[in-house]
Image (cartoon, coloured by chain):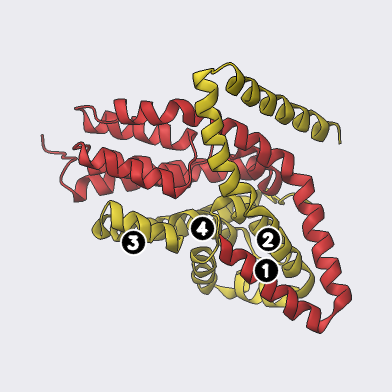
Chain colours: A yellow, B red
């Protein structure tokens, strides 16, 4: 709890800094304020529904289902499921981390989770459409096409490593 | 983002239909989880707001150098440290592109931005553990380097024979 108090203290201090910056026309502080508002809107609004959905997931979805699709018994299919789930995850890695942790404790193995987190930022559908329209479709297709095999390969390797280390993800977070 | 609220509402209604008790349990669990991690998200928010006030100028000024490999490497470093939503990152990449910055550099920037998260560490370590976070980011950085190089080769900007 102490760490919580400290962090909230820092946050309040930061807000005061932004406020003072406005009052004394401190330019850098005003730029930081603009950025802060943009990011705060983007991030903080997405968290409440995301966490309620995670809560629903943990209460309703049974372990067996997750083990069958995202566990090691699922074989190569689990990477495809992980990528499909990632493509539709709103909010990128911010939301993907807590979701991945919940999946893990419902029986997904580490390689599904790694694929999921990494793919969540790589192939998010709305973002990829935006990228294609600004940088070019060829660029986007190439980036996604080349990255997915690498992501799957590295997640399989990491899975082996973590299994050997008997690494466990934090529980009860 | 609005549709996440719509999805949540639909799921809650379905859940209520089946069990009032389990629905409350889910809401309580979600809220508890969020409150536990919220300070970490707030810390990231501060980092990002401060870093971004320097990064945008830095990116536009320095990523367009002559040396493509050096530019690509710099792009990867900047992309790894910063974090920004797509609606800022892509227009920025568009500006770079219109200034003649190479695809290699843009690929390095965009890919590392997505894959490697230095500022997201406070949240990632809570869910993945410290070791898990470090290994994932190391693997992601490796993938980013390989991908950037491949993209550079594809666009004919990175050549090995010269």
Residue ID at (48%, 45%): B139
| Residue, far left | B162
> Pointers 3 and 1 in contact (CB under 8 A)?
no
**Which residue is at a point 78% across and 48% down the rendered structure image?**
B35
Question: Which of marks 3 and 2 precedes in the sequence?
Answer: 2
How far separated are the C-alphas under marks 1 and 4? 19 Å
Reading the chain from its start, which is encountered first: label 3 or label 4? Answer: 4
Of B63 and A166, the residue lying toward us: B63
Mark 4 near mark 2, Cβ–Cβ under 8 Å? no
The residue furthest bottom is B18
For the residues bearing labels 2 and 3, Cβ distance under 8 angstroms: no
To the question of a shared chain for discs 3 and 4, the answer is yes
Q: How far across and how far down the image is residue A19, in percent?
A: 65, 25
**Marked residue nearer the N-terminal end (4 or 2):** 2
> Residue A93 location in percent, x, y?
56, 51
Badge 2, how many Cα within 10 Å: few under 14, some, many 20+? many
Tell me whether circle 3 and circle 4 mark residues in contact (CB < 8 Å). Answer: no
Using the rendered image of the protein, determine whether residue A71 is visible from the camera's viewpoint: no
Marked residue chain, label 4: A
- Residue identified by numbered label 1: B8
Q: Nearer the viewer, mark 1 or mark 4?
A: 1
Marks 3 and 4 sit apart, C-alpha to C-alpha, by: 15 Å
Residue B30 image label: none
Query: Within 10 Å of the Cα at label 3, are there few (<14), some (14-19), or many (20+) other Cα atoms?
Result: few
Secondary element at image label 3: helix
- Mark 2 highlights which residue? A49
Mark 1, secondary structure of its residue: helix
Dot label at residue A120: 4
Please say if the residues under marks 2 and 1 sit with CB atoms less than 8 Å apart: yes
Give the labeled residue for mark 3. A145
């Amino acid at each position: 709890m102490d760490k919580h108090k400290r962090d909230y203290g820092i946050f309040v201090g930061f807000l005061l800094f932004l406020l003072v910056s406005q009052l004394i026309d401190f330019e850098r502080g005003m730029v930081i304020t603009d950025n802060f508002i943009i990011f705060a809107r983007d991030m903080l609004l997405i968290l409440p529904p995301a966490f309620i959905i995670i809560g629903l997931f943990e209460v309703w979805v049974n372990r067996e289902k997750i083990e069958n699709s995202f566990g090691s018994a699922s074989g190569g299919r689990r990477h495809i499921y992980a990528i499909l789930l990632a493509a539709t995850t709103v909010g990128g890695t911010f939301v993907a981390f807590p979701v991945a942790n919940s999946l893990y404790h419902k029986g997904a193995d580490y390689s599904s989770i790694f694929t999921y987190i990494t793919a969540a930022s790589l192939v998010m559908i709305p973002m990829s459409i935006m990228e294609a329209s600004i940088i070019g479709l060829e660029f986007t297709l190439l980036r996604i096409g080349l990255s997915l095999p690498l992501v799957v390969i590295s997640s399989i390797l990491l899975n082996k490593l973590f299994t050997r280390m008997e690494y466990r993800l934090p529980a009860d977070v | 983002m609005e549709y996440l609220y719509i999805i949540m509402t639909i799921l809650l209604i379905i859940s209520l239909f089946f069990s009032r008790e389990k629905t409350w349990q889910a809401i309580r669990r979600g809220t508890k989880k969020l409150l536990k991690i919220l300070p970490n998200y707030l810390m990231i928010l501060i980092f990002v707001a401060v870093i971004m006030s320097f990064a945008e100028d830095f990116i536009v000024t320095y990523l367009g150098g002559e040396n493509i490999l050096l530019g690509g490497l710099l792009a990867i470093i900047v992309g790894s440290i910063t974090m920004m939503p797509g609606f800022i990152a892509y227009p920025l990449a568009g500006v770079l592109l219109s200034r003649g910055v190479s695809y290699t550099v843009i690929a390095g920037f965009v890919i590392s931005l997505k894959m490697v998260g230095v500022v997201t560490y406070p949240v990632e370590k809570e869910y993945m553990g410290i070791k898990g976070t470090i290994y994932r980011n190391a693997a992601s950085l490796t993938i980013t380097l390989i991908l950037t190089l491949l993209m550079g080769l594809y666009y004919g900007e990175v050549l090995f024979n010269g």
